[in-house]
Image: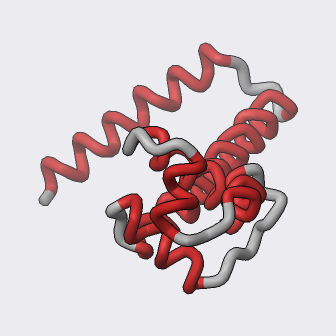
Amino acid sequence: MITMIGQNISSIRKQRGYTLSELSERTGISKSYLSNIERNLKQNPSIHVMEKIALVLKVDLKTLLKIAADAETNQQLDQEWMDFISDLKQSGIDKERIHEFKILIEFMKWNNDKIK
């Protein structure tokens, strides 16, 4: 989760139109320290530092951290799908066969919705 925080701060800072110097000035945090956070050289900033940044960027601290957690979750899910596809290929199932399964799954979903 922490590794994405720097990217989140950088992205939100740019969306707000702040330079690194302006964010530094508004938060009272040194420019070099902020730069290290954004470049993930400093990967575990304190909650106090994060609160200052969140306040200036006008984002809830939970939202700032959640963005990082969501990004990591999405990366994990993407990797799970890639692993699943790899397993299907290794077992000899080709794209056409997967399409047949998709039709079957859609039918099962339709049937479940109909029963409800």
Which of 44 and 86 lies nearest the eye of the viewer?
A: 44
Left or right: where 106 falls relative to 20: left
Name the residue at 65% across, 83% down: 46
Name the residue at 41% across, 39% down: 17
Which of 31 and 62 lies nearest the eye of the viewer?
A: 31
Left or right: where 82 falls relative to 9: right
> Whole-percent x and y of residue 44?
74, 75
Quadrant location, the N terminus:
bottom right
Left or right: where 113 falls relative to 102: left
Name the residue at 48% across, 48% down: 13
Report the coloring of the rendering.
secondary structure
Pick out the residue farthest to the top. Answer: 96
Which of 32 and 112 lies nearest the eye of the viewer?
A: 32
Q: How many marks?
A: 0
Name the residue at 81% across, 26% down: 92
> Whole-percent x and y of residue 114?
13, 48
Q: Quadrant of residue 28?
A: bottom right
> Whole-percent x and y of residue 36?
77, 58
Quadrant location, the C terminus:
bottom left
Left or right: where 7 falls relative to 61: right
Pick out the residue farthest to the front. Answer: 25
